[in-house]
Image (cartoon, helix red, strand yellow):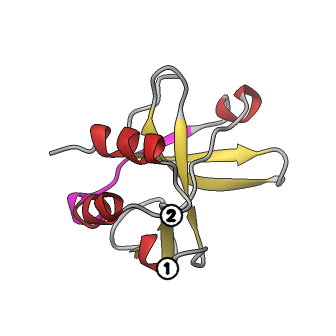
């Protein structure tokens, strides 16, 4: 599967035995994701609020966690279902948060994420 940066994916995470909603932020050479969670993690200012009205894959208030990049095993990636791009409104909130830089996210991964943001 080809992963598109800043698209939302629903992926079955075998180690957690559940579907997780993820956002791909980089796909070359391997896919890297941020999780969308039902509550905030770590530094709250780097958890972007997403309402059900923002995206069809979201059924309740959630947060895009920019604090931590996630790389998933191929066995999980084969279950990925593309649910389409994040809306511009959310991308517009992601850009300044990444420019400040979550302390839990390495500079390398921060720059990867910024480089793939749509205009």
Image spot of residue 61 (x, y percent): 49, 79
For the point 46% across and 64% down, the residue is 102
Of circles 1 and 2, the one toward us is 2
Assess disc 1: are there few (<14), some (14-19) or many (≥20) residues with their C-alpha within 10 Å of its C-alpha. Answer: some
Residue 103's mark?
A: 2
Which segment did they paint magenta? Answer: 81-91
Q: Look at the picture and state if 119 lies above or below 51.
A: above
N-terminal-most mark, 1 or 2 = 1
| Label 2: element kind | loop
Q: Residue 20's image quarter?
A: bottom right
| Tag 1 residue | 44
| View extreme (left): residue | 119
Of residues 89 and 82, the one nearer the viewer is 89
Image spot of residue 101 (x, y percent): 39, 61
Q: Look at the picture and state if 117 lies above or below 18.
A: above
| Label 1: element kind | helix
Q: Look at the picture and state if 30 lies above or below 47.
A: above
- In the rendered image, the quadrant that contains the C terminus is top left
For the point 56% across and 61% down, the residue is 104
């Amino acid at each position: 599967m080809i992963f598109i940066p800043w698209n939302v994916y629903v992926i079955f995470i075998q180690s957690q035995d559940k579907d997780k909603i993820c956002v791909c932020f980089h796909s070359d050479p391997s896919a890297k994701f941020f999780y969308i969670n039902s509550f905030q993690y770590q530094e709250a200012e780097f958890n972007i609020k997403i309402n059900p009205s923002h995206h069809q894959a979201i059924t309740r208030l959630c947060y895009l966690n920019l604090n931590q990049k996630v790389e998933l095993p191929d066995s999980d990636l084969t279950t990925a279902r593309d649910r389409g791009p994040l809306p511009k409104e959310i991308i517009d909130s992601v850009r300044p948060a990444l420019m400040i830089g979550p302390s839990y996210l390495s500079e390398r991964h921060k720059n990867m994420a910024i480089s793939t943001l749509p205009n």
